[in-house]
Image (cartoon, rainbow, N blue to C red):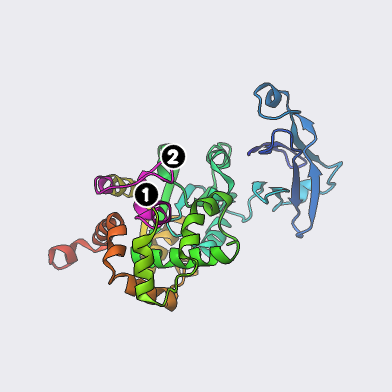
Amino acid sequence: MLFNVEFDRKGIIEGYLIPDGFSDQSSILVTRDDGTVVSFPCDQPRPAVVQSGRHATGIVGFRIDESRMPDLASQRRLAIQDARTGLLIYRRPPVDEPVELKLLRLELNIVPMAKFDAYCGGNFQYAISAVERFGHETTMQAFHLHAHKSIYISGRLLLRNYEEFLDNGFQAIADVPDPYYEMACRLFILKRLAKGPVTFLGDRDRLILTPASEHFAEVNLDDDKAVNRALKKASDKARSVLISPITRQLVCTYPEQRVTRRDIAAAIGTLSRFKVVGHEGDHAHFQQAIGELLSLPPMNIPVIPRYSLLEELAMRLRQMPVAESMLEEDLILDHYVRQAMVPSAQRTGKPQR
């Protein structure tokens, strides 16, 4: 999906929305300051879209003016979304002083930090969360919104495919999860997925996770022997979603790509480029650093709560050699992340000054 707003002159907004389907008709939803929503078809021709082979008719543009919305100029918080997916296309600044920064939050947890994104993203003019659900083309479009100086993107992306944007105006942040706790989360989600859809997973995720979901569907996660046996007997496709997923996100370009110890250095190098790196074991550090970066009160920044049920499963996974072997690269990476977060005086044994 391709989209953009070409200009916003208070009483006139013009842009385009090219749908995924070659002959689909696109439409937009405009949310006014009072929360009411108005629907408009994309009815403006864009001949170049036909010439490039992107759409059958090229009727993908939209124009909103005061003949359609008489009080358009006074709508300070107006927002425009794709009617089919809910994807944000454009919005006027949602706050008086939006953060003037282009920021990527790389999601390294299978359970997204939705409250974090809602709070932090609400301080940017443009924001899109769980961007991986919309596919590679839509994600690239979000990165290419050059007219915006205030952009917040978050998602469980394979970063190597988007790393160029770290050299092109974007800064990156990430909160690195504990590998065993993340494995526990994934096993729990796999069992849920076997019973029905999980709302925060996109179509591609469901396709990738299905073999593992089917394998673990009947496994009792409270039974250590059953979990251990299931991990050992998992097929390559089922194992792949559990093998060092954090390292893979940092160095791989496609989901089925495997990692080895040689990739750890590259993963560490990638993380060294991030503006803020947190660790699940120290939420206060992450909140403080994000607060300073975005000029927001640190204590108001939400973090993912840890669940005792999953913590218990993670503790039991630590006792299983098969789990350790599957997480080998992530465990080494986790060690270096923890070491980097320890003050230098504590690492050397010298007193802090």
- Mark 1 is surrounded, within 10 Å at the Cα level, by few (under 14), some (14 to 19) or many (20 or more) other residues, namely many
Total numbered circles:
2
The part of the image, by quadrant, that contains residue 181 is: bottom left
Residue mark closest to the camera, 2 vs 1: 1
Quick one: label 2 or label 1, which is nearer the N terminus? Answer: 2
Q: Residue at x 74, y 33 (%)?
A: 23
Give x and y (percent) for residue 325: 27, 59
Can residue 53 be seen at all in this image of the molecule? Answer: yes
Along the horizontal axis of the image, is 109 left or right of 46?
left
Residue at numbered disc 1: 248
Can residue 279 be seen at all in this image of the molecule? Answer: no
Along the horizontal axis of the image, is 277 left or right of 338?
right
Identity, as a three-letter code, of the amino acid under mark 2: Asn
Which element carries disc 1, helix, strand or loop? helix
**In the image, which residues are magenta?**
236-265
- Mark 2 is surrounded, within 10 Å at the Cα level, by few (under 14), some (14 to 19) or many (20 or more) other residues, namely some
Along the horizontal axis of the image, is 228 left or right of 95?
left
Which element carries disc 2, helix, strand or loop? helix
Identity, as a three-letter code, of the amino acid under mark 1: Arg
Residue at numbered disc 2: 161
